[in-house]
Amino acid sequence: MDTLNTTFARRLFISHLITTVERPSVPVLMEKTGWPRRTIQDVIKAIPGMGVNIYFKQDGRRNNDGYYVIDQWGAINPDWLQQNIDNVKSTLKFN
């Protein structure tokens, strides 16, 4: 597989984490990636541009209590992503 565009790889990686991590909030995603809050927020904001439907599921009394959910993948095949996650990680130099 050829190397992916880094911006696209970030979006794929966060999408993968949202579907595989329990209660994927921004702080949880920061912990999993080591990326700053703003980077995570920017990537999440850009994911719908790939045709993926992502939303924040409120789960608590405060506005920021909850986590992200993907309910439609658009043109992205989640099975392909699962099978190629190591390539996505290597593009990001993520171990």
Image (cartoon, rainbow, N blue to C red):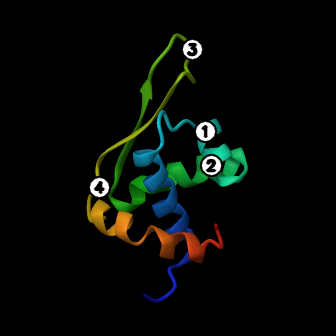
Name the mark on residue 28.
Answer: 1
Work out how far the residue at label 3 is from the one at label 1, CA to CA, in angstroms.
Answer: 17 Å
Work out how far the residue at label 4 is from the one at label 3, CA to CA, in angstroms.
Answer: 28 Å
Using the image, determine if residue 10 lies above or below residue 25. Answer: below
Whether the residues at callouts 1 and 2 have beta carbons within 8 Å, the answer is yes
Callout 4: SS = loop
Q: Residue furthest bottom?
A: 2
Using the image, determine if residue 70 lies above or below residue 83. Answer: above
Work out how far the residue at label 3 is from the one at label 2, CA to CA, in angstroms.
Answer: 23 Å
Mark 2 burial class by Cα count in 10 Å: few <14, some 14-19, many 20+: few
Three-letter residue code for mark 3:
Arg
Name the mark on residue 73.
Answer: 4
Name the mark on residue 44.
Answer: none
Whether the residues at callouts 4 and 2 have beta carbons within 8 Å, the answer is no
Three-letter residue code for mark 2:
Lys
Q: Is residue 86 left or right of residue 82?
A: right
Q: Position of residue 8 (x, y in %)?
A: 50, 70
Q: Earlier in the sequence, mark 3 or mark 1?
A: 1
Report the residue marked by disc 2: 32
Pair 3/1: label in front: 1
Q: Is residue 36 left or right of residue 54?
A: right
Report the residue marked by disc 3: 62
Q: Position of residue 66 (x, y in %)?
A: 50, 26
The residue under the point 29% across, 55% down is 73
- Seen from the viewer's position, the closer of residues 4 and 21 is 21
Mark 1 burial class by Cα count in 10 Å: few <14, some 14-19, many 20+: some
Whether the residues at callouts 3 and 1 have beta carbons within 8 Å, the answer is no
Three-letter residue code for mark 1:
Val
